[in-house]
Amino acid sequence: MVESWQGYRGRVREILLAAGLDIGDEVEVVKPDGEVYRGYLMSRYEHAEDGYIVIKLRNGYNIGIAITEGVVIRRVGPGPKPAFKRPEPPKLDPNLPHVSIISTGGTIASRVDYRTGAVKPALTSEDLITLVPEIAEKAYVEAEILLSKFSENMTPSDWDKIAQKIDEKIRSGYSGVVISHGTDTMHYTAAALSFALAGTPIPVVLVGAQRSSDRPSSDAATNLIAAVQIAAYAPFGEVVVAMHDWHSDNVIAIHRGTRVVKMHTSSRDAFRSVNAEPIAYLRNNELVLNDEHYNKRGSNSYDYRPGFSDEAALVKFYPSLSPAIIEYFLERGFRGIILEGTGLGHVASNWIPTLRKAIEMGVFIGMTSQCRFGRVNMYVYDNGRDIKRVGVTPLEDMLSETALVKLMWVLARTRELEDVRRMMLTPIAGELGYRTLPSSMRPEQT
């Protein structure tokens, strides 16, 4: 019973506990002037003002009552307890493409906790199917819970767990896989899976929601239906992120996993492809291809290589930042650092001796840009040329988040600096722009 009292504190909580009350009980509240209120005791927002209780009257209205000296609260009897009855699951057609939905948590699998006002994990993966029956019209879906985490709690070991589960589904013959995931770090996970599952023969679709499924403006159902359709029928074998392209529900953008970034904190169209166009759009339920460069569904180029090192870091340069930050990572045994430099790829010139020291120690230093669009070019200014001369590797138009994840993946495979450099500049999953690559290294085209 104690857990149900979250939301009540201090003297009021003590009074309710002493009266043997529980949330949902029918109570009678008698004021000193003889006024009587009868209703069902409700939980409260835990940060609301102390000294009140909330009851639901029989007419359906909620009222707050100040518990002052002389107020008497009596238990009338047990009231109806709030309960969720899951609807009957939709009938599935085994003749449709088989799609696996793997839940890892996040807002798409969450609801609002009206006691605290916060969003908390609540829906199971099975709930996603039951509460969004339209997906049964798209595919024969099977769902399971792998993780139940908000995405800020994801780690590289979680990426490996997800990759292993997807590999099992690929080898079991599924037409596609949908990963429900929190949006805050979904682009990191998408990049990680792009490298661990390079050349996947089926679509791997990461999907999330900016607003939980019990909000009127939720994008959860629309995104999930689209993700299942993409997983079942798209002609490409790629790791992608499928989210709203705009506020309306009629267009879902399908972003390559190594080219996508969350660009807005709360808008439904938060995700954008950077230095590339989305692979495709789902417009009014019709898949419209937008990029001729993609790995084909069913291709035989699949290369399952999981594993990520935790000895890599991402450092965002800003004016006055001391190069001592590099020394910090060197002292802790890090073997690779991605610099997010200014403009074309710069840090202050007083960093150069420390960068030289790090590289002489065999530590990889890669340069990306804080500018969301464009590519680094360290030949334009003297400072850039000096930084490159000591051994910093320019990473073309690779996103800094993708560069970090790729470096983690590379460092799990080699400790040799030259091998790290070579692998970081070798395209794996569309992380380097086509303008950078010779034609022989571009992805297979349709």
Image (cartoon, rainbow, N blue to C red):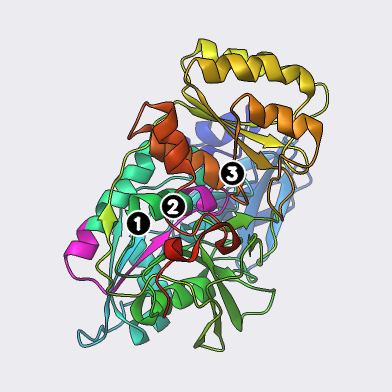
Q: Is residue 54 magenta?
A: no
Q: What amino acid does circle 3 point to?
A: Leu
- Answer with left or right where residue 82 lies relative to residue 125: right
Residue 69 visible: no
Residue 137 visible: yes
Mark pair 3, 1: CA separation: 20 Å
Q: Which residue is mark 1?
A: 198
Q: Quarter of the image for the N terminus: give it.
A: top left
Mark pair 3, 2: CA separation: 32 Å
Q: Is residue 159 above or below residue 338?
A: below
x and y, in percent, of residue 233 in the image: 36, 82
Q: Quarter of the image for the C terminus: give it.
A: bottom left
- Answer with left or right where residue 91 lies relative to residue 325: left
Q: What amino acid does circle 2 point to?
A: Gly
Q: Secondary structure at mark 1?
A: strand
Q: Which residue is mark 2?
A: 105
Disc 1 residue crowd, few under 14, some 14–19, many 20+, Cα 10 Å = many
Q: Nearer the viewer, mark 3 or mark 2?
A: 3
Q: State which region is magenta.
A: 168-190
Of pointers 1 and 2, the one earlier in the residue sequence:
2
Of pointers 3 and 1, the one earlier in the residue sequence:
1
Q: What amino acid does circle 1 point to?
A: Ala
Q: Is residue 248 above or below residue 415?
A: below
Q: Nearer the viewer, mark 3 or mark 1?
A: 3
Name the residue furthest left: 172
